[in-house]
Image (cartoon, rainbow, N blue to C red):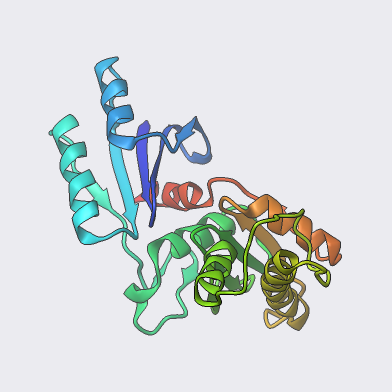
Amino acid sequence: MIVLLIDQGNTKAKYAWCDVIENKKHQASGFFSSAPIIHSIEEQALVGLKPDRILMASVASEANQKAIKSSVQEIYPKLALEIITTPTQAYGLTNAYQAHTRLGVDRWLAMLGAKATTDKAFIVIDAGTAVTLDVVDKQGNHQGGWILPNVNFCAESLANRAGKIELKQLNPISISLGRVTEDCVYNALYASHIQLIKSQYNEQITGEKPLILLAGGDAQLYLELLQQEQVPAKIVTNLVFLGMLEYLSD
């Protein structure tokens, strides 16, 4: 079965074509791209690539979601576009939000994808436009999470509001005390994030030391900073797409 997965984020959309082996959906093969999505899908349609199912998850505005939905349906008019939304509970994962739809579907799917890779308690950190952290125990119960602002956005906002702060010299990131203004700003912001992650790791609200799984554009940076603090973590790519694959059993 050929499946087209679309992950529409805050700033860009990604897609994946997966050739899913029956009863082995997590051995799916395919390719992942953040290229201009509609143009790329059109190119693949022209060479005869046709999916059996199309699944989409979106945290973008309603207008942007409708635009992609309309374009995809023009390319594949005979296929229904399946929109994934955040449930209260599904596939062994329970949402901690009382108003379940307010949990971003990207966070839900990242947790679902993480759960598919381990039977242990875990913390998912998606370091992108925002930095999200979600804690899940080994029974699949979401304990809640945090949403942190992107460090670069925070630094730029501070510089714009404080006339004497200039961010010119960007040095290698660490969480040590800074000796130039740029280091004082960036290191402090990253230190606050790393200490929050470390506090959740050490608090063990799940009853055991959780796995820390990193995703997103800044995952490698957070991995290096956590390693400096002797906090074990690993990068798992395409967590949202792994979560979407769970829906193929429907």
Number of numbered discs overlaid on the protein picture: 0
Q: Nearer the viewer, residue 178 or 75?
A: 178
Q: Is residue 76 visible?
A: no
Residue 33 relative to residue 232: left or right: left
Please tell me which residue is depicted at 24% across the width and 53% down the height of the picture. Answer: 65
Q: Residue 68's quadrant in the figure?
A: top left
Q: Quadrant of the N terminus?
A: top left
* As drawn, 236 above or below 29: below
Image position, residue 209 (x, y; %):
77, 72
Q: Which residue is most to the front? A: 164
Image position, residue 93 (x, y; %):
49, 68
Image position, residue 120 (x, y; %):
68, 65
Please tell me which residue is depicted at 31% across the width and 62% down the height of the picture. Answer: 85
Q: Residue 203's quadrant in the figure?
A: bottom right
Please tell me which residue is depicted at 70% across the width and 59% down the height of the picture. Answer: 222
Q: Is residue 52 visible?
A: yes
